[in-house]
Amino acid sequence: MEEKLKELYIQEIHQSRLDFDNNPEYQAYYTQAQQLWEGGDIPYSIYRLLDTSNFLSFAHGFRLGMELSGWLRTG
């Protein structure tokens, strides 16, 4: 299931339905993070942490949506 969630996550990004670049709140936090390092170059390990947290948020939202959908069908 995790692989399928990763595929869906990547698909949502590529089709611009999940667009972090155009989210003002995300960009504000990302800009703050960039300012912590000289030249604004976020270390790769921190970038991976951000990317992983984005995926985990997506996966959690997806699973919650599936649970709500099941709840609506039974209720």
Image (spheres, rainbow, N blue to C red):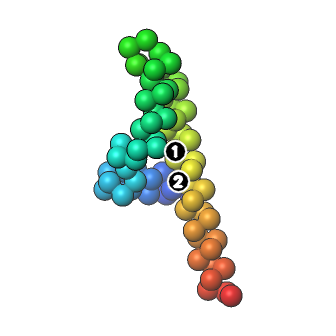
Name the residue located 46 percent from the left edge and 42 percent from the top edge: 26
Above or below for 71 versus 8? below
* Circle 1 Cα neighbour tier, 10 Å, few/some/many (<14 / 14–19 / ≥20): some
Image coordinates for residue 45, horizontal then vertical, percent: 52, 24
Residue 59 image point, x, y percent: 56, 55
Q: Which mark is residue 12?
A: none
Image quadrant for the C terminus? bottom right
Residue at 50 percent across and 18 percent down: it is: 36
Element class at badge 1: helix
In the rendered structure, are the residues bearing label 2 and label 1 in contact, judged by CB atoms less than 8 Å apart?
yes
Q: Which residue is mark 1?
A: 54
Q: Which residue is mark 2?
A: 58
Residue 44 in the image, given as x and y percentages of width and height: 47, 23
Point 46% across, 43% down: residue: 25
Tell me the amino acid under the disc marked 1. Asn
Q: Residue extending furthest top?
A: 38
Q: Residue at x 49, y 57 (%)?
A: 4
Question: From where the camera sits, is residue 40 visible?
Answer: yes
